[in-house]
Amino acid sequence: MTIRSSYPEVEIPDVSLFEFLFADGFGDRADAPALIDGSSGASLTFAQLHGMVVKIAAALAERGIGAGDVVGLFAPNTPYWVAVFHGVLRANAIVTSANSLYTARELAHQLVDSSAKLLITISPFLDRATAAAEQAGLGPDAVITMDPAEGHTSLADLLATTAEPPALTVTATDIAVLPYSSGTTGKAKGVVLTHRNLVANLLQIGPLLHVTPETRLLAVLPFFHIYGMTVMMNHGLLARSTVITMPKFDLEEFLRIISTHKIQLVFIAPPVAVALAKHPLVDAYDLSCVEVILSGAAPLDAELGHAVAKRLGCRVLQGYGMTEMSPVSHCIPDDRSGIDLNSVGYLVPNMECKLVDPGTGEEVGPGERGELWCRGPNVMTGYLNNPEATAETLDAEGFLHTGDVAVVTEDGVFTIVDRVKELIKYKGYQVPPAELEALLLTNDKIADAAVIGVRDAEGEEVPKAFVVRQPGATLTEDDVMAFVAERIAPHKKVRVVEFIDAVPKSASGKILRKDLRARETSAR
């Protein structure tokens, strides 16, 4: 059976994201702070932000960036990240946002795969950024910094232009962003999201998460991730609220910023909830301003969520989504009580879904487990230059096969209970086992390897490597972990190693991860 959202449909205008967020002006909010750097207190008003966006667009056009061109954005959260992001879109170009933890090798892959022509970063990232640009075949003048850096064009240089911005020619169906999502096989894939996808999801969120111009929300989760990009950055701009940014999570600074800036709405991933529930430092700050905490990116345990709510005296909610859905498809609404916190709430407006038995392919009803398939205006058009992966994920009827197993109640409340796909989610970041396996096999002391997700002592899913040594090789667990850590972003590191005699495989050579999981279970 097809399940439709119980919320009334919202009307989605046929406009670009820039027009949707900026074309109507800001009214009495023009001189209000749109963005505040939580660390320094520096701010941009809505009028200042708009001015910067237009200048950046003009400067990029002067450099030959226009319709269909891709610009990489490799930086932590700051107000300038937002200005650059929208400046690229205003130049009729496309943003590919890169994980700020990426190594040069990982960043180079994204630049090459997306055909990026420019890379905008910050000076502390220049070692990785310039190395990646070189590997991607980009010249040294293709790397621009947000802050002054000798030998590089800076954001200040872009803002000094006297040129007029180009005519806005992008349409709702044009590509807006290319975030990268780790698949279950191979390297990360570019997710093709149009202006309409992003505009639609902003409107779909509204009826479940009410943000007003008076709301002050914290953006500590990264803007390069679609969760931060849509739910924090662009949702805040749409509501004309004030978004306070943090470049990275640090508990003491996180608590200080909430207290100092009187933040009411906080977006987190589950590891932050652990600190809020248990760390003694929390008691040193006045967090009474917090009204709602929304957790996403990975499953939140209800007991943990309730502990946070009790300690802070606030409401804790949970949502669900994927990069491929721009990202929100489900959310516990902030104006309804009594909904199980283990659940991800209701389907957002303009969406429909099915639950399909992975074994039989038959649709199942309330109370039965099935893979979650979703269809709506926020669903990606496909994976960049990867028709095979697109066909595996998007069916002919437009349903996105999420790879997550869910159940739904008669009232339309969804709970994610399992995963069909093999993707590991470590602290909200996606970690593809195949990428780690391929890397491990480049070590001449390793004969074979397989990676699965296991739970650590705190219940966090972490990558575990099962390794077969080459005959006669001397290799320790620490050697394996160090080998991976030197070549990959920190969130992808192997954190547990077990040496085995052989990796279990099917007759066709596919790794039998279920056998490894069974081995893990029996060893407990």
Image (tube, helix red, strand yellow):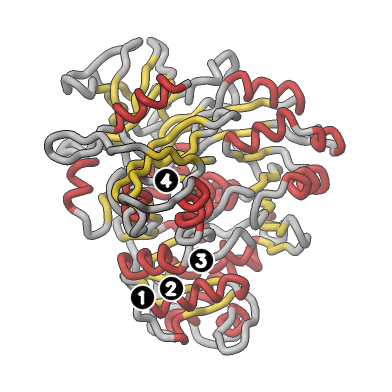
Q: Residues within 10 Å of mark 3 (few under 14, many from 20)?
A: many
Percent of width and height locating residue 121: 54, 71
Q: Which residue is mark 4?
A: 431
Look at the numbered disc 1 and give the secondary structure of its residue.
loop
Q: Amino acid at mark 3?
A: Phe
Residue 194 visible in rendering? no
Total number of numbered discs in the rendering: 4
Percent of width and height locating residue 293: 64, 33
- The first of marks 4 and 1 along the sequence is 1
Q: Which residue is mark 2?
A: 132
Is 10 displayed left or right of 44 in the figure?
A: left
Percent of width and height locating residue 229: 51, 52
Is 403 displayed left or right of 464 in the figure?
A: left
Label 4 with label 3: CB-CB less than 8 Å: no
User: From the viewer's perspective, is the residue at label 2 or at label 3 nearer?
Assistant: 2
User: From the viewer's perspective, is the residue at label 1 or at label 3 nearer?
Assistant: 1
Q: Amino acid at mark 1?
A: Ala
Residue pictured at 69% horizontal, 62% vertical = 45
Q: Which residue is mark 1?
A: 136
Mark 1 to mark 2: distance in Å?
6 Å
Q: Amino acid at mark 4?
A: Val
Label 1 with label 2: CB-CB less than 8 Å: yes
Residue pictured at 29% horizontal, 50% vertical = 447
Residue situated in front as seen by the camera: 31 or 28: 31
Label 2 with label 3: CB-CB less than 8 Å: yes
Mark 4 to mark 1: distance in Å?
23 Å
Residue situated in front as seen by the camera: 53 or 177: 177
Q: Amino acid at mark 2?
A: Ala
